[in-house]
Image (cartoon, helix red, strand yellow):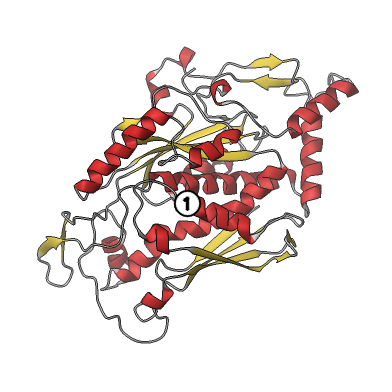
Amino acid sequence: MLRFLTAGESHGKALVVIVEGLPAGLSVTVDEVAEELARRRLGFGRGPRMRFEADEVTLLGGLRHGRTLGSPVAIEIANTEWAKWEEEMSPHPGKPQKVLTRPRPGHADLAGMQKYGFDDARDVLERASARETAARVAAGCLAKALLGRLGVSVLSHVVAIGGEQVQGDIRPGPADLALIDGSAVRCFDPDAQARMVEAIRAAAKDGDSLGGVVEVLAYGVPVGLGSHVHWDRRLDGLLAQAFMSVNAVKQVEIGGGYEVTARRGSEAHDAISWDSEAYEYRRETLRAGGIEGGMSTGGTLAARLGMKPLATLSRPVLQTVDVVTKQATVSFKERTDVTAVPAMGVVAEAMMSLVLASEALRKFGGDSVAELVRNRDGYVDALGSTPSSALSSRTTSVPVGVRKARRVTARKAPGASARKAPKSGG
């Protein structure tokens, strides 16, 4: 089991994340974590704070000479703007210079103030801020490194911003990540990218914001992560909860999602075939998103996340009420973006990676990375030609040469081309 806990506020001295459950022997460097955090700052439509709020990463514990020790890993992400906020966000006794009494619609402000008895919205918004997701991305970097040792890769791409969206079902493969990150909006479709950029420009001119949709994909996931036996062990349920915990995400689809509900049953599921060369079962479509009965099927995992337009606008027009005077007014302005959809995709990658890494550790176990990989290899090697082969007394004997070939296939780093990836609507 992999667990993580984050602490810190948006304008506080630092964010801290502690990750527990990583096996010993996993290679991790400051540069790798910093690179993932830099990806989170990508995207046309981000505010100017992305340029001066650099992420200064410090590995505080759980590693020695670049490798995990099997103990909890602690990472600090310092706030380079702390000097400007030290007095306002001081942890020592005192009073703030400015009290925020006009809660912003669409944020945690008012509900949090009522829940905790605060009279200052900053007591809520600092922790509720999406800045906290930087700590999740740092934790997700560790999870990605672990999954990489199992031949699993996770990436995301933007499929819609505002009313502009990608046409068709072309999906990127692991080798396309650099191309996606090189896009102004992390979109794999150049034509759609151009339209999205123009939509962002138009919204920025009006002082408004845009939401959108990202798709997050996992390649090389072994069959059997998750479980059908308990409601809280189902892989799709775990992913949905993880995705919905991301700020401003209001919709999650696994596979075909809502579109599949309009189909007849004969057209809503993924047919199963047998690939004798790869010695594995195949599903040529992704209507179920690579998950059936709460378990991974061994194919590509696909999910889409819908993000609402950001509620803090450059031109405050949303009506609210001053909690002191009870008079109608407009919400205060905090630094914001026109859209954060591209960044949300990077956070979604982190959340999917953390869930998959946790379930891989639950499934395969091991105190070291080497032991985890051995256990995974043994599991893959034991998979027979029929689902019941592991328990049946009539197990079909698999020739050693075929078993070795299958093992090599399982270990091979995934590199499915974008156009050969299964389609959700197939």
Q: Residue furthest right?
A: 400
Is any part of residue 391 visible from this angle?
no
**Residue sitting at x 55%, y 26%:** 418
**Residue sitting at x 75%, y 34%:** 411
Q: In the picture provided, is 395 more to the left or to the right than 228?
A: right
**Residue sitting at x 29%, y 46%:** 309
Q: Is residue 110 above or below residue 406?
A: below
Q: Secondary structure at mark 1?
A: helix
Q: Nearer the viewer, residue 294 or 366?
A: 366
Q: Position of residue 390 (x, y in %)?
A: 79, 28
Query: Looking at the rendering, which quadrant does residue 174 occupy?
Result: top right
Query: Looking at the rendering, which quadrant does residue 9 occupy?
Result: bottom left
Q: In the picture provided, is 166 more to the left or to the right than 237?
A: left
Q: Nearer the viewer, residue 226 or 77?
A: 77
**Residue sitting at x 77%, y 56%:** 25
Q: Which residue is mark 1?
A: 40
Q: Residue furthest left?
A: 327
For badge 1, the amino acid type reads Arg
Q: Position of residue 153 (x, y in %)?
A: 62, 39
